[in-house]
Amino acid sequence: MSDRVFNIPASGYLDALRRNGVDYFVTVPDWVQLGLHVRVEQGVEGLNLVRCCNEDQAVCVSAGLRIAGARPVTVVQNQGLYACVNTIRAVGLDAAMPIVFLVGQFGREFSNFGHDPSQSARNTVKLLEPVLNALGVKFWRLEDENDLPRIDEAFAYADKESRPAVLIVGSPTGWN
Amino acid sequence: MNLLQACAIIEKARKDSILVATMGAMFAFDGLKAAQPRISSVPLMGGAASLGLGLAIAEPRRKVVVVDGDASLLMQLGGLATVADRQPANFVHFVVRNGAQFTGVANLATPAESCVDYAGLAAAAGYRRTYRFDNEAAFAEHIDETLAAAGPTFVELRVVTPPPIPGAPLKMEIPELQFHRMGAEARALSTWLKEHPHG
């Protein structure tokens, strides 16, 4: 049995967001990322929280912020990403805006940690990567602390290519 | 008051406010040769208010003027609460109410046209000020007040619906521009904001 720990602390995410210059946390809250949400709700210097009622709004708010020179991260869950596919098409693809997402894999079986999400029995989980592939949106999996540099890769890619980038949060965020 | 008259009043008064328009209003502002700072939410019904909110948050010293459609607003009614949660003082949200979808082409009825109260919804969501206008003279008289007041402000503009043009989609291919202009305008607006800092 592997002793790999599928848990990235909220502090690890915040360090990564900080070094990528993120100043706005635009969100519809996600179960998988609750540790991070709670930490941001408590107040993080230099990181402004924008609460949205749905993911279409989160994408558009992020776009407006980005146009005006801010550096938002858009934090949602897999169901929310499915809900805002047309807005990603319009804002991220047609308008070529570099929206960077953290997307929680809500509903993922613990037994699936460390395995390919396509092996999940749940559509909510296993459809995420195929949907992103169909959209032509690049994604990175975040499974443990060793994956944190992928956050830097995603921001660099979005900046360079003016494309959306999705970081898939595969397991619950640590509350530390 | 018709759509062009309403948009002309806004365009004349907005000065260097950022204009975020969608649907019929976007074409009316095109006809008025509205220039930067502006961006269109297209083809994306419902996106204008949230796009404008992001701009208003990042540019707190500059006014943001959103010109939405009634059916577009209905698609994102929760967006009223998203705006209200931030209470952006520099945010003015106009909604052009004509009670129709595919206006001037098919004029399909907008849901709840007979009973919905858009300004009432905005007030209940938490907008600081709301207004309603249905004639050109009254709107022109109050436009400066609506733009100057601390927001978030919501303005419902009742406009007449032009007659439909049966069969128009058979002859009108959607132009390529409609799929690229939001990106081009985003880049132009971003550049404009860098060249005109702090409003």
Image (tube, helix red, strand yellow):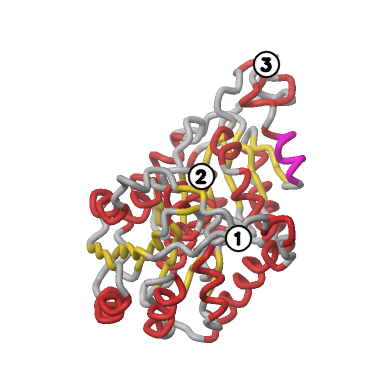
Q: Is residue B37 above or below residue A135?
A: below
**Secondary-structure class at tag 3:** loop
Tag 1's secondary structure? loop
Q: Answer with left or right where residue B89 lies relative to residue A116.
A: left
Quarter of the rendering containing residue B88: bottom left
Chain to which mark 1 belongs: B
Residue pictured at 51% horizontal, 44% vertical: A55
Q: Nearer the viewer, mark 1 or mark 2?
A: 1
Is B168 left or right of B81, judged from the image as shown? right
Q: Are marks 2 and 3 on the same chain?
A: yes
Furthest-top residue in view?
Answer: A1
Q: Which residue is mark 1?
A: B165
Q: CA distance from mark 2 to mark 3?
A: 25 Å
Instruction: Tell me the amino acid under the disc marked 3.
Output: Ala
The residue beneath circle 2 is A55
A148 or B98: which is nearer to us?
A: B98
Whether discs 1 and 3 lie on one chain: the answer is: no
Give coordinates of residue B57: x percent, y percent. Answer: 40, 65
Residues shaded magenta = A129-135
**On-image quarter of the C terminus of chain B:** bottom left
Amino acid at the residue labelled 1: Ile
Query: x and y percent of residue B103 in the render?
Result: 52, 59
Which of the two residues, B176 or B88, is positioned nearer the viewer here? Answer: B176
In this rendering, the answer to whether B40 lies above or below B195 is above
* Structural distance between the alpha carbons of marks 1 and 3: 50 Å
The percent coordinates of residue B120 (x first, y second) are: 25, 52
Q: Do pointers 1 and 2 mark residues of a single chain? A: no
Q: Which residue is mark 3?
A: A121
Q: CA distance from mark 1 to mark 2?
A: 35 Å
